[in-house]
Amino acid sequence: MYRIIRKEQLSTVITLFEVEAPLLARAAKPGQFLIVRALEDSERIPLTVCDFNPEKGTVTIVIQTIGASSKELCALEQGDYVCDVVGPLGRPSEFMEQPVEEVRGKSFVFLAGGLGTAPVYPQAKYLHSIGAKVDVILGAKTERLVILEKEMAGVCDNLYICTDDGSKGFKGLVTGKLEELIGSGRQYDTAVAIGPMIMMKFATLSARKFNLPIIVSMNTLMVDGTGMCGACRLTVDGQTKFACVDGPEFDGYKVDFDGAMRRLGIYRSKEMEANEAYEQAKAARDHKCRIGIGE
């Protein structure tokens, strides 16, 4: 059992949990993920690591309320216990395996889309800590869905906010801001895009215009997180890979995004069924509670 020591509502649909997990906190690296199970009979949910503190013995995860499993997890409160937290899993970010002296001299630009801001944070934090140049382009549909702005500003050289409706920062997509920055003379050695699949596809297309190497994270495909279920199969450079054990990060130019997006759609009906069953069960429990207190 893993105690929740902090719960913070980042937006109406996004929740942050800081969880006591000393062994995981000491082993976690940027780019990796955890498997979380809220209750004994809950579904396993793969969640990328947002932050980790070896001294406190805590890991931080960020969850967007979408389906039944995420609703179940987000219903927990500070002081409650998460049944299981397993990890760290997956391969760390590529630059974690490179000599610090080599990485320190490079310039990185991160494109963070929505919930993708969470896994971008530890990567930017590490690179900034060793002296690399780091710019972050953070995108959301509207100002109220912008998350971790203050935290991100503290771990990068320049933070650019983009909103689809123009309610904050640059009006438009993160790809538009990237092209604007490079067009104005900004130079980068590597781009990293993490967010919705369609956003990463177009980020890769934008990077190609400038021959800019780009890394993308395919964590949205993961289900089991161990390579056993095969749900996160994708084609990379003509070969079959698994996002959970071979990634979750890959060279964006080598990823078959269209195939990956088709795979995402396979489970949509099952997700809707599970969500409906969860809501029905919750309504039944609430009704019994009201009867029990005499309402």
Image (spheres, rainbow, N blue to C red):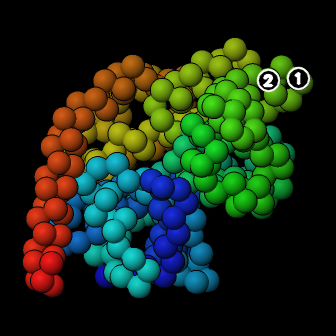
How far from the left and from the top, in percent, is residue 286? 17, 70
**Which one is nearer the viewer's eye here, 120 or 68?**
68
**Which one is nearer the viewer's eye here, 118 or 68?**
68
Q: Residues within 10 Å of mark 2 (few under 14, many from 20)?
A: few
Among all residues in the image, which is located at the extreme right? 185
How far from the left and from the top, in percent, is residue 11? 53, 56
Distance from disc 2 to disc 1, alpha carbons, whole Å, reads 6 Å
Q: Secondary structure at mark 1?
A: loop
Where residue 82 sits, quadrant-wise, is bottom left
Amino acid type for the residue under numbered disc 2: Glu
Q: Look at the picture and state if 12 lies above or below 74.
A: above
How far from the left and from the top, in percent, is residue 206? 65, 20
Q: Which mark is residue 127?
A: none
In-image side of 26 versus 87 (left or right): right
Amino acid type for the residue under numbered disc 1: Ser
Where residue 179 sits, quadrant-wise, is top right
> Where is mark 1, residue-wise?
184
Q: Which mark is residue 180?
A: 2
Observer able to see residue 25: yes
In-image side of 118 versus 262 (left or right): right
Among all residues in the image, which is located at the extreme front? 295
The answer to whether the residues at label 2 and label 1 have Cβ atoms under 8 Å apart is yes
Q: Look at the picture and state if 152 lies above or below 188.
A: below
Residue at x 73% of width, y 59% of height: 150
Q: Look at the picture and state if 286 lies above or below 269.
A: below
Residue at x 62% of width, y 31% of height: 164
